[in-house]
Amino acid sequence: MRPEFKYEKELAGTANAKKRKMEQYRKIVSHLYVIGKASIADIVKQSKISQPLVASLVDDLLGFGILLDNGIGESIGGRRPNLYCINPEYQYVLGIDINLHTLTIALFDLNNQLVCRQEFKNFDLENSSIYTDQLVVKVNEILREMNISTANVLAMGVSIPGLVDAENGITFTHLSFAKEGLAFYLSNKLGFSVLLDNDARLMALGEKAFGKAKGKKDVLCLNLSNRIGLGIILNGQLYSGKNGFAGEFGHILIDPDGDLCYCGKIGCLETLTSGEILVRNINKALEKGQASLLSSKKDKGFSVDLRAVIEAIVEGDQFAIDQLNKMGEYLGKGLVTLIHLLNPEMIIIGGRLAHTGKYISDPVNMAMNKYAMDRISSETELVCSELLDDSALMGTLSNVMNEVLGIN
Ligand SMILES: [Zn+2]
């Protein structure tokens, strides 16, 4: 079910007349969503719709409540024009970020402002309706707390790791129990449209709309958390591949004599470099008596997980930094293949490990300098995400708004 604004659902007339009207309204709403506020004359120029028709469409949209009169703008000779903008509270977009152990739910208004964000730790992902039913309960609780009705939710965007067929709303790696597809299943339970996609691709969308990839054409967005994901922006567009599975960068072969990967292959990049591997290697060394800020934590009975490792790195723990360096070298090697192939202008490190900043970007940069052809790699800027843990959430928002407004 394609998400529609409230007023679009209420339009009367024949299917063709409705479609034409919806397209005209969307042109205006979409322009105001991107630009913020505009006068009738601005909208006429941009939409190529006649002045009297724009005036009447804007009147309709004011009546529906989706537009607001934003007061008087600057004059460019003659009478000062009225400006119009989107009513940010007309409807809301829900964003859900599903991770292996954490669930984050966010609510955005139509000005892309975060209205509410709740994170549920130890919300372990399992392939059952128990998980999704709990998720539905949490979403409904938040809507109740915020006093927002189902009708006032434009749509919900969902970010989930693993293989996803975004077009048909089907997940293959996680929550694949829903035979009719996860999007349909959730939409049925909640009463509004649900759009889902793979987490790395949504992170890339988030970076493109609100982060460091804004205005850039060729960008690789890495999701470096427990595992490795990759979102690819080529020529300003998110690249998905034939089935939507593009970006399985963690499973490129790096070491033919290496370890078995959870995907069933041997020596994948993810057997050498990922948050999970980092934590595993550090724990092994701590058990053998390695000196580190983390050893006293372990002695006190705290589990040394990715969160603890990242904290230790940021505090300057030499051993943890050394381990991250090793990982960075493998990652850099893997990235060189992509750089030679795609010649990106930017690589963004996102995901949990982006919190380590220069501690991850420095070793990756060094490996890139070492293994890549200078003429190609010198044009590629390596940066850490500023959206950090929220890039996938911001991506779910962007995904919904792009779909509703027909923006690419
Ligand atoms: Zn693999």
Image (cartoon, grey):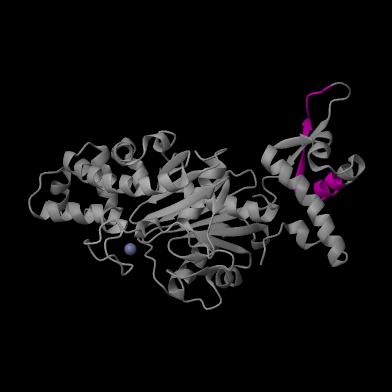
Q: Would residue 95 be found to the left or right of residue 309 on screen? A: right
- For image coordinates 67% across by 48% down, the residue present is 89
Give yes or no for residue 365 being in the magenta stretch. no
Q: Nearer the viewer, residue 127 or 48?
A: 48
Give yes or no for residue 66 being in the magenta stretch. yes
The answer to whether any part of residue 116 appears in the image is no
Q: How many labels does the image show?
A: 0
Quarter holding the N terminus is: bottom right
Question: Residue 397: x, y in percent?
Answer: 57, 51
Outermost residue to the top: 77
Q: Nearer the viewer, residue 230 or 314?
A: 230
Question: Residue 354: x, y in percent?
Answer: 36, 43
Task: Indicate whether 321 appears above or below 257.
Answer: above
The answer to whether any part of residue 221 appears in the image is yes
Question: Residue 160: x, y in percent?
Answer: 46, 61
Which image quadrant is residue 322 in?
Answer: top left
Task: Indicate whether 258 appears above or below 397.
Answer: below
- For image coordinates 77% across by 59% down, the residue present is 8
Outermost residue to the right: 52
Outermost residue to the bottom: 179
Q: Would residue 383 be found to the left or right of residue 3 on screen? A: left
Which span is picked out in magenta? Answer: 57-76
Task: Indicate whether 9 appears above or below 231.
Answer: below
- For image coordinates 37% across by 61% down, the residue present is 100
Question: Residue 356: x, y in percent?
Answer: 32, 40
Question: Ligand 1 quadrant?
Answer: bottom left
